[in-house]
Amino acid sequence: MRPLPVLLALVGAIGLAACFPPRGNVEPPAADAAITAAALKRFPGTTAEQVALGRTVMVGNCKACHGLPAIASEPAEEWEQEILPEMAAKAKLSETDKAALVRFVLGARDTVK
């Protein structure tokens, strides 16, 4: 058995892993009036309660599987057309939770300068 090559490989792997931190665990913004107003522009009739529910869904479901990505990390179109539909299906969200999540994420994304 050759302990030195194994030790070097292990140290190298740990060092390399440190260069690529996990993509996630960024606390989403509070579901505030600005996010609600931005969501309202996209989705007429949106309520503050829906936006708050969307944040709750994101923190409760997304974080459990893979962490929370920064909402600004992807363009709004990608969130709307790819990420949210795929993740909502995988998480088996109800239509109410899915609609709330979409409103929160896109509203929050639209407030990023």
Image: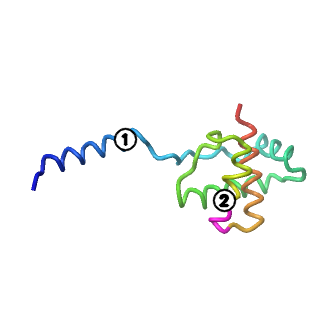
Q: For the point 53% across and 60% down, which residue is it?
A: 65
Residue 104: image x %, image y %?
A: 73, 50
Question: Range of the magenta residues?
Answer: 86-92
Instruction: Say whether residue 35 is left or right of residue 59.
Output: right
Q: Residues within 10 Å of mark 1 (few under 14, many from 20)?
A: few
Residue 18: mark in rendering? 1
The kind of secondary structure element at disc 2 is helix
Rounded to the nearest angstrom, the CA distance separating label 2 from label 1 is 29 Å
Q: Earlier in the sequence, mark 2 or mark 1?
A: 1
Q: Mark 1 belongs to which amino acid?
A: Ala
Q: Name the residue located 68 percent from the left edge and 46 percent from the top edge.
A: 30
Residue named by callout 2: 86
Percent across and percent down for residue 12 are: 27, 42
Dot 2 alpha-carbon crowd within 10 angstroms: few under 14, some 14 to 19, many 20 or more: few
User: What coloring was used for the rendering?
Assistant: rainbow
Q: Nearer the viewer, residue 64 or 6?
A: 6
Indicate the position of residue 47 as horizontal and vertical percent values: 84, 53
State the residue lying farthest toward the top: 113
Secondary structure at badge 1 equals helix
Rendering coords of residue 7 (x, y %)? 18, 47
* Extreme-right residue of the structure: 44
The amino acid pointed to by label 2 is Glu
- Residue 89 counted in the magenta span: yes
The residue shown at (9%, 56%) is: 1
- 81 horizontally vs 11: left or right: right
Q: Quadrant of the C terminus?
A: top right
Our reading of the magenta stretch's main secondary structure is helix
